[in-house]
Image (tube, coloured by chain):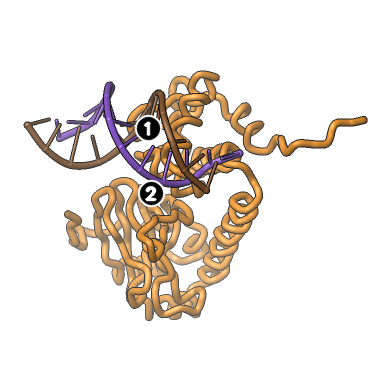
Chain colours: A orange, B purple, C brown
Amino acid sequence: MGSSKTLPRLDESLLSYLPQFMRLSRQDIRDILDQAVSRRFDADTVIFEEGAPAERFYLLLDGYVRVLRITKEGKRVILLHIQSGQLIGIARAIGRTEYPATAMTASECLALSWPMSLFDVFAEKYDGFINETQKAVGRRMNEMNTRIVELSSQHVDRRVANALLRLIDQSGREVGDGVEIDFPITRKDLSELSATTLHTVSRLMTAWERDGIVKSSRQRIVVRNPRKLAELGHVDKTKQPPIR
DNA sequence: ACATTAATTATGT
DNA sequence: ACATAATTAATGT
């Protein structure tokens, strides 16, 4: 379960290096922190749900969060992953009063949150907040743009390869023989990111393991050869008509 | 070029 | 021991 304590006192360094708060005085940051609720979440815990009234917005201080939606038929679709230092649940920033998607922790997480009414206050009062937030929204839109094109035009192996590449880009941790995705991730998760089945992902992974591109065990994936994976990701192997 | 179904095995508490 | 994750083969579209 997640505990909901406002622990002793939040240190100002938690915020002072984040783009949204970088320009602010120590006192401003103090005020912001004093209004925050700090909460720890276990892995695989829902932070907020699609369609629910967007009462609070969050700043992820540690861990990783999945943003997802569930189709009418009960199929999960993962939209993107969020890493620490990022705001989530900022429905207000896109003019919505309900959360547009569900946020679920992918690992143990620590997050601050504020009532949504403060979003407008922050935007008005604190230099750089709305600007940097808008940039973050833009980056996510960008990612989803490329993903839409990917999902609707590329073959599975490329989709999965590119999903993996984004994951190590956003949450890669250097390990002995490559770079590991920094949170537990299953074949099923990958398939929900790539619009395919866990079986296909499984087959791809064993093939890529044989080729030394990845190494995986239960809920762990290490990319040993990002270059080769990137080739799989963008090499266009749609059949060209033979010359002559 | 894939998904689906089903059976089997591996792995973590 | 039990649940969940991963593999594998067979079959379907």
Instruction: Categorize mark 1 by other alpha carbons within 10 Å: few (<14), some (14-19), many (20+).
Output: some
Q: What amino acid is found at the position of numbered circle 2 in the picture?
A: Tyr
Q: Residue A220 carries which label?
A: 1
Chain ID of residue with mark 1 = A
Relative to A150, A111 lies left or right: left
The secondary structure type at the circle numbered 2 is loop
Residue A221 sits above or below residue A115 on the image: above
> Which residue appears at 46% of the width and 36% of the height?
A201
Does the CB distance between marks 2 and 1 fall below 8 Å?
Answer: no
> Which residue appears at 37% of the width and 68% of the height?
A50
Residue A169 visible in image:
no
Instruction: Categorize mark 2 by other alpha carbons within 10 Å: few (<14), some (14-19), many (20+).
Output: many
Where is residue A31? Give x, y as percent.
35, 71
Q: Along the line of sight, which residue is nearer the eye, A52 or B3? A: B3
Q: Along the line of sight, which residue is nearer the eye, A179 or A17? A: A179
Where is residue A64? Give x, y as percent.
38, 49
Q: Distance between the residues labelled 2 and 1?
A: 15 Å
Where is residue A163? Give x, y as percent.
53, 43
Q: What amino acid is found at the position of numbered circle 1 in the picture?
A: Arg
Q: Which mark is residue A64?
A: 2
Chain ID of residue with mark 2 = A
Where is residue A82? Give x, y as percent.
44, 53
> Which residue appears at 17% of the width and 54% of the height?
A1
> Which residue appears at 49% of the width and 42% of the height?
A167
Farthest residue to the right: give it. A244
